[in-house]
Image (spheres, grey):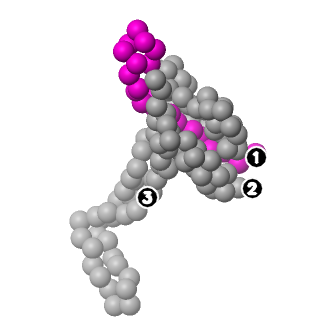
């Protein structure tokens, strides 16, 4: 099973928990420039082209969102969202240094964060019962 398939399984499984909202982090790259000239046949020419990266910072996890937690009575029983981030990897996928640094910082700040290679590991990261 590849990383994309694992990610979809995790999203479907976490979607069964009403206290969890998880979103897919989309990133991309394109080209921008001073002018875009439409050519016959549907091609375009870009003058003074430069790469354009969109999306989230380098190392950002594949999935992010929050899990609702009910605070104890000493805080009036409030239910608050706690940020969650899941880096999805395939069976042999390795964590890049930038990904490791982001996950470590999120964990240090009290967020639910970690690496998941299966829906079960995603449940563990969010401390959810199967």
> Residue 47, image x and y in percent?
28, 70
What's the residue at 49%, 33% (across, down)? Answer: 67
Say if residue 57 shows up in the picture.
Answer: yes
Does the magenta portion include 54?
no
**First to last magenta residue range:** 71-92
Report crowding for label 2: few under 14, some 14 to 19, many 20 or more residues within 10 A (C-alpha).
few
Q: Marks 2 and 3, Cα distance to the nearest angstrom?
A: 26 Å
Front-most of 65 and 102? 65
| Relative to 33, 51 lies left or right | right
Q: Is residue 74 above or below residue 9?
A: above
What's the residue at 54%, 28% (across, down)? Answer: 112
> Where is the C terminus found, in terms of image quarters?
top right
Specify the farthest residue to the left: 34
> Residue 61, image x and y in percent?
53, 40
Quadrant in the picture for residue 57: top left
| Relative to 62, 41 lies left or right | left
What's the residue at 38%, 90% (across, down)? Answer: 41
Specify the farthest residue to the top: 74
> Residue 108, image x and y in percent?
51, 19
| Marks 1,2: beta carbons within 8 A | yes
The residue under label 2 is 1
The residue under label 1 is 91
Front-most of 30 and 100? 100
Q: Is residue 107 above or below residue 16?
A: above
| Relative to 104, 30 lies left or right | left
| Relative to 83, 88 lies left or right | right
Determine whether the residue tagged by mark 2 lies in a helix, strand or loop. loop
């Amino acid at each position: 099973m590849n990383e994309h398939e694992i990610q979809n399984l995790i999203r479907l499984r976490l979607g069964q928990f009403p206290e969890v909202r998880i979103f897919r982090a989309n990133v991309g790259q394109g080209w921008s420039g001073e002018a875009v000239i439409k050519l016959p046949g549907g091609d375009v020419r870009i003058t003074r082209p430069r790469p354009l990266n969109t999306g989230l910072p380098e190392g950002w996890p594949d999935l992010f969102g929050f899990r609702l937690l009910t605070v104890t009575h000493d805080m009036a029983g409030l239910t608050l969202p706690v940020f969650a981030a899941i880096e999805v990897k395939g069976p042999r996928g390795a964590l890049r240094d930038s990904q490791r640094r982001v996950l470590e910082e999120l964990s240090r700040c009290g967020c639910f964060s970690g690496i998941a290679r299966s829906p079960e590991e995603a449940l563990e990261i969010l401390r959810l019962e199967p």
